[in-house]
Image (cartoon, rainbow, N blue to C red):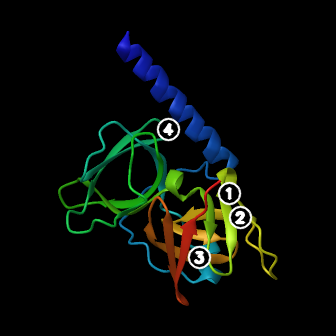
Amino acid sequence: MKQSNMRRISLSLTLLVAMMLIVAGCNERKAAPKVVAPIVDSTLVENVPDTTVYGVCGDGCSMHMLELVTADGDTISYAVNLDDTGTIKGGMNVGDRVAVVGHKDADGFWRADNAVNLTTLLGKWSSIDKNFEIQEGGVVVSTVTEPKPLTEWKICNANLVLSTDTFSVYSLGADSLYLENAKGIFAYKRMKN
């Protein structure tokens, strides 16, 4: 009986993730070749193929292993580099949605090069000159009137694209977000609801 309930929960989570990906326009699953997510020039992001694999953290996640259950129901186990504790930005908890860029090593094992916890990324963020909320479905709501307000977001090769600007996620925690591009590192704190 427990195994049947677990399958139903797993199927429900998979269907939920699939629906969210379709809404966000991320319904194409691409192969994950070896790619290290560089800082990408904002003007080039449309020409860069997205090698990100999307899914939810499975029950097999541990300190150095990310078990990703994709929208197609496939399970990929990524080894997390023991020397790089910042590989998975935002941490990993069972059921969290995650975007991963990885590669297969010489022994045929998957290795996570970079990953962003999308569940942790969602929310209201604030800095000295910006206040915005990253919402489901690729929507950004900005409360600051500016010439180019933030209106949308997406992930491309584990980089965060906010409207027309592309950032690598330097650090992501429960209450802080650091984004980096060619202009520098931008710090944000999470705003309470």
Task: Pick whichever of labels 2 and 1 is earlier in the sequence.
Answer: 1
Instruction: Residue at 43% x, 22% y: name it.
Output: 7
Query: In the picture provided, is 32 more to the left or to the right than 108?
Result: right
Residue 37's quadrant in the figure?
A: bottom left
Task: Give the labeled residue for mark 1.
Answer: 138
Foreground label between 4 and 3:
3
Task: Pick whichever of labels 2 and 4 is earlier in the sequence.
Answer: 4
Please state which of residues 175 and 108 is positioned toward the viewer in this rendering. 175
Q: Secondary structure at mark 3?
A: strand
Residue 183: x and y in percent read 55, 90
**In the rendering, which numbered label is found on residue 166?**
3
Query: In the picture provided, is 76 more to the left or to the right than 136?
Result: left
The answer to whether the residues at label 3 and label 1 have Cβ atoms under 8 Å apart is: no
Residue 59: x and y in percent read 33, 36
Instruction: Residue at 46% x, 58% y: name it.
Output: 174
Please state which of residues 135 and 40 is positioned toward the viewer in this rendering. 135
Around disc 1, counting alpha carbons within 10 Å, would you say few (fewer than 14), some (14 to 19), or many (20 or more)? many
Task: Pick whichever of labels 3 and 1 is earlier in the sequence.
Answer: 1
Foreground label between 2 and 4:
2
Around disc 4, counting alpha carbons within 10 Å, would you say few (fewer than 14), some (14 to 19), or many (20 or more)? few
Task: Give the labeled residue for mark 2.
Answer: 152
The answer to whether the residues at label 2 and label 1 have Cβ atoms under 8 Å apart is: yes
**In the rendering, which numbered label is found on residue 72?**
4
Residue 76's quadrant in the figure?
A: top left
Count of numbered circles on the image: 4
Residue 153: x and y in percent read 65, 64
